[in-house]
């Protein structure tokens, strides 16, 4: 595990389907970046149909998924960048991320500190983690091994 990316765990995360943490062994087993990205988009589609989310939240979630980084298993761009991608204001993106956190779709993790935030704080290096992605990746690997 890389210390600053504490959510990439050597073991199995507790309550993996409700966690933003992922197994380090999963990264090693995915040989193809495109297959990993396909899992991210499968994860997105499973949440995009949630009728309780506003269109702005779904668009923000799309932008966050588009900027997923396999090195960190997170998305860590500035809200202003997501705003430029979507045509929303930075304030709206911040509100949407907070709504996605309340809906337990995303976690806001602090780089280098084992902390989860409810809302982003200025000057703190944040990473947006995808809740349940680790479980989906494990399921995809087991499906690939069955074939």
Image (cartoon, grey):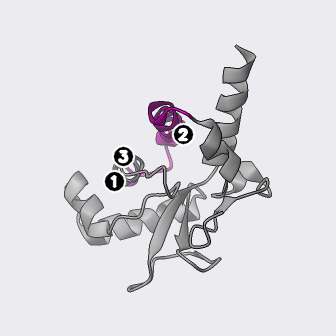
Q: Which stretch did the figure color magenta? A: 31-58
Asked whether, in this view, residue 113 is left or right of residue 143, the answer is: left
Kindly report which numbered mark, 3 or 1, lies closer to the viewer in this rendering: 3
Q: Are marks 3 and 2 in contact (CB under 8 Å)?
A: no
The circle drawn on residue 66 is 3
- The residue where tag 2 is placed is 43
Real-space CA distance between mark 2 and mark 1, rounded to the nearest whole angstrom: 18 Å
x, y (%) of residue 44?
48, 41
Q: Answer whether residue 116 is magenta in the image.
A: no
129 and 26: which is toward the camera: 26
Quarter occupied by the C terminus: top right
Q: Answer whether residue 54 is magenta in the image.
A: yes
The circle drawn on residue 56 is 1
Where disc 1 sits, the SS reads: helix
Where disc 2 sits, the SS reads: helix
Q: Which residue is drawn at 23% across and 53% down?
A: 85
In terms of sequence position, does the residue under pointer 3 or pointer 2 come before the other? 2
91 and 23: which is toward the camera: 23
Q: Which residue is drawn at 50% across and 30% down?
A: 35
x, y (%) of residue 134?
65, 47
| Quadrant of the image occupied by residue 29 | top right
Dominant secondary structure of the residues highlighted in magenta in the image: helix
Real-space CA distance between mark 3 and mark 2, rounded to the nearest whole angstrom: 12 Å
């Amino acid at each position: 595990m890389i210390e600053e990316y504490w959510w990439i765990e050597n073991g199995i995360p507790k309550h993996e389907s409700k966690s933003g943490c992922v197994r380090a062994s999963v990264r090693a087993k995915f040989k193809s970046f495109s297959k990993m990205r396909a899992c991210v988009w499968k994860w997105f589609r499973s949440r995009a149909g949630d009728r309780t989310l506003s269109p702005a939240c779904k668009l923000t979630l799309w932008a966050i998924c588009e900027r997923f980084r396999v090195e960190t298993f997170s998305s860590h761009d500035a809200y202003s960048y997501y705003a430029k991608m979507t045509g929303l204001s930075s304030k709206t993106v911040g509100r949407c991320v907070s709504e996605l956190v309340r809906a337990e779709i995303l976690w806001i993790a602090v780089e280098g500190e084992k902390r989860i935030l409810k809302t982003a704080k200025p000057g703190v290096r944040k990473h947006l983690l995808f809740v349940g992605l680790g479980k989906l990746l494990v399921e995809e690997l087991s499906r690939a091994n069955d074939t």
